[in-house]
Image (cartoon, rainbow, N blue to C red):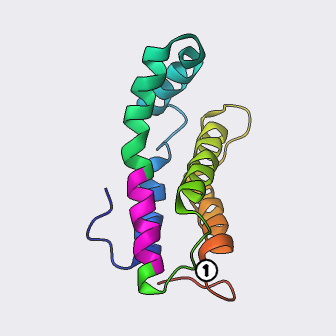
Amino acid sequence: MTRGAAGPWRQLDRFIGHYLPDSPTDPVWILWMEAWARAPHSAEVSQFMEALLRPWRDDLAAIVARGVDEGAFVRPGDIDDFTLRFVALLDGLALQRLRQLHQLSRKRAIELAMNTARAELAPGPQTTEP
């Protein structure tokens, strides 16, 4: 999804941009929300959703591992725990973006996600990659 992005911070930024909905009417996210509503009532839907989400978490784990290996990120304890928390954050930001009552801009959602990543992954004082 983000192969070819220069540097782990840029790669993470692109990952976030691909993950979050483009607009409050993003059809992929609207279908995803409908599946979430059905998942507690259907093991099949839950398994299908897990199959769709697993590659995203795997890509995120690879980005974090690359950043750690290159010294751009500090190791966030357990990478699987980080990916679980971070995807949950992205899901929450996506839901905020899809709500019709309070409009969270795409740019602001990406900024909030990157700020959270920097708080946990940046070595030393908050740093960014150009």
Residue displayed at 31% across by 55% down: 1
Left or right, residue 20 beside residue 62: right
- For the residue pair 23 and 9, the one nearer the viewer reads as 9
Q: Residue furthest left?
A: 4
Residue displayed at 63% across by 37% down: 95
Q: Residue under circle 1? A: 122
How far across and down, in percent of the image, does residue 51 sit? Answer: 38, 33
- For the residue pair 77 and 15, the one nearer the viewer reads as 77
Q: In terms of image quadrants, where is residue 50?
A: top left
Residue displayed at 63% across by 58% down: 108
For residue 62: magenta? yes
Q: Which residues are magenta?
A: 58-68
Q: Amino acid at mark 1?
A: Ala
For residue 20: magenta? no
How far across and down, in percent of the image, does residue 28 sit? Answer: 41, 31
How far across and down, in percent of the image, does residue 3 sit? Answer: 27, 65
Relative to 114, is 39 above or below? above
Relative to 88, is 130 above or below? below
Left or right, residue 40 beside residue 17: right
Left or right, residue 75 beside residue 14: right
